[in-house]
Image (tube, rainbow, N blue to C red):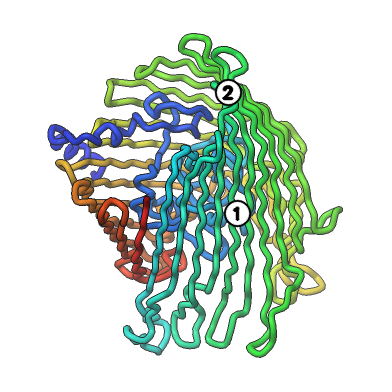
Amino acid sequence: MCFAGLCGLGLAFAQEQTGEGEESAYRLEAITVTGTKTEKRLADTPIATEIITAEEIEHSGADTVMDILSDYGVMYTSNAMGDYVQLQGMGESRVLYLIDGRRVVGRIAQRLNGETLPLGNVERIEIVRGPQSALYGSDGIGGVINIITKKPDGEVSLSVSLTNRFLLAYDDPDTSYKADPLSDFDPVREQTAVVKAGFPIGPARSSITLEGSRGNFYYAEKEAASILPEYKRGKAGFDTAFNPGDASEVRFGGSFMMMRSDEKTSAVGSMERKDYTRADGYIETNFTPLESATLTLRLYDNYYQRDKDTYSGPLDTWYTGDNHENENLLAAEAMGVYDGIENYIITLGLEGAYNTMDKYNLRNDEETFAAADKEAVFFQAERFTEDVYSVIAGLRLERNSQFGSLVAAPKLSAMYHLSKEFRVLGGAGVGYRAPDFNEMYLVKDDTPGHPLILGNEDLKPEYSLGFNLGLEYAQPGHSAQVNFYYTELRDEIEYIDTGVAGYTGTNIYRPENIYRSMRLGADSEAKVNVFDYGFLSAGYSYIFAWDREEKEKLHEQPAHMIKMKAGGDFTGAGIYTYLQGRYFSPLYPEDPDYEARFILDFYFSAEIGGHIKLRFSIDNITGEIDSLGPATSQTFSMGIQYSL
């Protein structure tokens, strides 16, 4: 209903759209790269892709990529174990997370902590739903989230921003204590400072982004556990590019993040402390060895480390125990693109990677250390006529030592323009996910009273077969799209109860390839510009998941999700504002402990004198607090940004 209504509203207001910025809002003119690994207009891409633009990121008021994904209904929940992202009913390690096409390692319980790089260094976010293993390999069963960073442009620039967040006092209905609105709220809960600079160094174009954040403890109630832990986090991103020739470019850089987080905190002290470190470095070059042929070479390394210290008592000191986790991925890629044949693009790629993990409770022949190598080749052929149609066929062959066999992942995608404004697109593809090191080798918690978790070295990869069919409509000022999907997933890896340990009497859990399941649903969204300043958008998503082994529904995400947004972009006055709401149906409708959630956010920004921008926002106006998120009630943010 929202989809159809906004389409009609868009047509009604179409004649009013005469502003100079119309073409920038024309969705199909946007440039995308993730679905095909080559830059092209969205109008010519037969892969359903959602693009979150730099302007939308700037106006979000968010500090992290995961905050952005949450606003767009992609991130289901976030907690100490990481960020849980869902695409078409696939979550955890079945969604591939990339930075400029490079893999990011380091998941906790298969969830990824997305605090990887400064948000100020992000140009756009591309979300591609459905199996993408034909291009990207393992983990691309549910889709791909690709963070595209800003390329240095060689201009001298400087931007500095400061943000402070505070929280209202929270009255927990499960305790007898009543919060005092004046004395129990935190006026300086969280602060973030960001510095961005661009500068030329001889023939090189360079940019650097620095970010620092800190947060205080925030207690749910007196003497009770903290809603939010104390943390300190620093990030840095650096990129340099230069052109050694007219038809070539070399780019290198990286990012670094360090974070310390205290958790399980009460009024008597912290019981746990975690340190996180992430580092990413890369070098790549693009050049044209032959006419109509482009070759891209890339070498990168992605590193993740997590250490945990334990606090034994209020008067004792911290000590470091044997509780660590380090993961590293070293990868090399080569890709050639040939477009010398009219209406054809041929892509051929080679990849090699070496993945290692050192973890205190990872037991195998090497004792706490595991390694895997991967070699892959992919081929893709596209026939297209601009603004008319596109057909892509692709195949990836990969050998992965984690499961010791050759995997083939084919795909087929097609798109046809019914008119300049309407296009229909669809596709089918095979996805797969290799078992990770934890699933294969983990030995965890054999103390009395706790379950014993054992890895399984005989696991096979998971496989999926997915189908997508979509319809998109776009004109300057208004757009709409709907995408239907169907996915079969087999050989799912699930921890199951395999018996009781005789020496402790505790249950033993071990991962097995046992499940087969199905997911079908639809995602839709419509956007409308109202006259010269206003905008409206609405989206609805539905999913039905079925466990074919147990003959019952799966409840991994809410069946219904609705999002709506209304605001104004008053360019002449430098004012941008919106009100945004998201509704999630109960995860278990038949269980009274699970309720529907409605989250409402507000944002306002104003430019002063062309160099200063003031920002104000309220997240979670409705005050929802739930184990599935959000973790806090109303969060107020005030910020200031200065740019040269």
Q: Can residue 560 be seen from the camera position used here?
A: no
Answer with left or right where residue 102 lies relative to residue 325: left
Residue furthest to the right: 365
Q: Is residue 113 above or below residue 213?
A: above
Residue 609 lies, in percent from the top left, at 25, 54
Q: Are marks 2 and 1 in contact (CB under 8 Å)?
A: no
Element carrying mark 2: strand
Residue occupying image coordinates x 58% and y 73%: 262
Q: Which mark is residue 256?
A: 1
Quarter of the image holding residue 251? top right
Residue occupying image coordinates x 51% and y 56%: 210
Q: Which residue is mark 2?
A: 245
At label 2, the amino acid type is Gly
Question: Considering depth in this image, is 365 or 164 the residue closer to the camera?
Answer: 164
Answer with left or right where residue 419 lies relative to residue 109: left
Q: Is residue 182 above or below residue 119?
A: below
Q: Is residue 333 above or below residue 358?
A: above
Question: Considering depth in this image, is 231 or 535 the residue closer to the camera?
Answer: 231
